[in-house]
Image: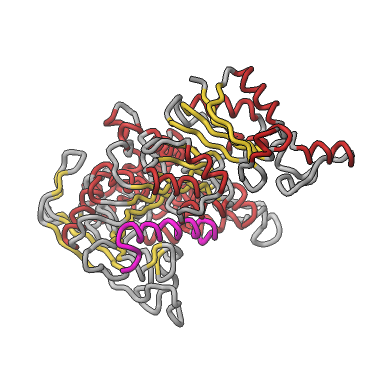
Amino acid sequence: MPDVIPENSVGLVTPKVQHFDTPLTLRSGRVLEQYDLIYETYGELNADRSNAVLICHALSGDHHAAGYHSMDDKKPGWWDTCIGPGKPIDTNKFFVVSLNNLGGCSGSTGPVSINPETGKAYGPDFPIMAVRDWVNSQARLADVLGIDVWAAVVGGSLGGMQVLRWSIQFPERLKHAVVIASAPKLSAQNIAFNEVARQAIAKDPDFHDGWYQEKGTLPKAGLMQARMLGHLTYLSDDAMRQKFGRELREGKLNFSFAPEFQVESYLHYQGEKFSTRFDANTYMLMTKALDYFDPARDHDNDLRKCLSQAKCRFLVVSFTTDWRFAPARSEEIVNALIHADKDVSYACIESDNGHDAFLLPIPRYLDIFHAYMEGVAARSFGGKS
Amino acid sequence: MSELRPDLSIIQQWIRPESEILDLGCGEGELLSYLKNEKNVHGYGLEINPEKLTACIRNGVNVIEQNLDNGLGNFEDQSIDTVVMTQALQAVQRPDELLDEMLRIGKEAIVTFPNFGYWKTRFYLLLKGRMPMSDTLPYNWYDTPNIHMCTFRDFEILCREKGIRILNKTVVDDQHREHWSIRLWPAMLGEIAVYHITRR
């Protein structure tokens, strides 16, 4: 709980909900007749609406990217290290929009929402979303907010994929794209991790093929396993060694199968926490969106051709020990952009923190991000809001 | 923008407006920034020093974090008009291979490097019997980043062996100034050389 709101925080924020009743046709061919998007905004939109920044969230993220909902909150939003007054995405300059994606479980229409056609929760019947569907829905939110052109669209991991999609789907509607710890498509290994996670959920007897809400159960064990697997792939070998080593909870071996090593209890704790706050169907759906993302596929598998549609400038950032979205994957994006003659800068940040690094206050990362966003401000609206 | 570093102001004369350039070891992006503003040149810089890389980003220059010693395989053949490298040739693992790479990627290249045949350097070794140190070469033999020092003659012989044509050459002092005396005996009196080369 923050006794006092820190000076560089956006402070107390209240999410808003926008209802849409224009049908949204999805990549799968299915149609969402109506839906809600929950979002937060930080900072002020300037008179000519040129200072807006869109935040795209990753697998388990949501609209609450910065600040606090109440003085009782234990933690601020998930990207509070990067969004706020004086931070890289400086809310003294920018008007920041952060939403929960469709299919999410934090307030936007998703599997836990009521399907107006049946009067029951969608559950597993909620359409599987593609990254482009999210981008289309985000563009509609921009329309409602009166934002024709984003000064920047920013995201890490799955969020970075949305940024890439924005750059080719609505090239006229963004000036800068910031793609952090991301990839132009998942590797087989990455898809495999996602499938193990999905199987852990699907095989939980409480999952009931996704109809657990109706049955009054929760596939907590499956979701916990999925999260434990995910979480350990977001850390690096070094980070885990430093954090836990082979430390034992009770200082001795008990010759039992209960968690004995600190790393085991940490994973249990993370999994447990996640399994009570996150929806299993949302997890299934988000991992599918990750697996499906491959924008070059529509362009003879040529990423250069694909990204040559973009008109914005790019910043691409990776982290040395991120093996889930390795630097080499970011470099594929960078090289395609160079071959397409696009404006791009790239930094690979030294960090022990694996994929999680993009959420952490690593000085060099924040410096570069900050310097780039100052340029975004200067080029988009002369630096002053 | 008139206070461009002297070596860069020599280099910029040889770069055509609207062209595409690649600056290997681009520092804080001074050259790229100048060429973008003055000649509408599009380009990328490669840099590995974290502070300099951030400075490039602050200066609005396209900069890629990439180590020259790991190769330039990500750049396509003849995709760049001019590849520039200032004061880095002597510091890479294989200058000869890097030169080949520069002219594979670039139609032309511009390189600058310190002359190990400068008279003071020659006399330093001759008289003191120690590896030469100077304002241009301020390092000890054991901690110097300059692992492949050469003289102008060495460089020109390498170019001849490789079939590289020298389009222009300017020899200057350590302040990058041209001087009539240097023109008299460049191999002895020049401290830094700026070569404009091609394979075409």
Quadrant hosting residue A145: bottom left
Give the prevailing secondary structure in the magenta stretch.
helix
Q: Please tell me whether residue B85 belongs to the stretch shown in magenta.
A: no
Tally of numbered tags:
0
Magenta stretch, residue numbers: A361-385
Residue in the picture at 45% in, 49% down: A225
Can residue A191 be seen here? The reply is no
- Residue B51 image offset from top left, x and y in percent: 57, 54
Specify whether A272 is left or right of B101. Answer: left
Query: Taking A98 as reference, is A117 above or below it?
Result: above
Quadrant hosting residue A198: top left
Residue in the picture at 36% in, 60% down: A378
Q: Please tell me whether residue A379 belongs to the stretch shown in magenta.
A: yes
Quarter of the image with the C terminus of chain A in it: bottom left
- Residue A20 image offset from top left, x and y in percent: 14, 58
Quarter of the image with the N terminus of chain A in it: bottom left
Residue nearest the observer in this picture, B180 or A153: B180
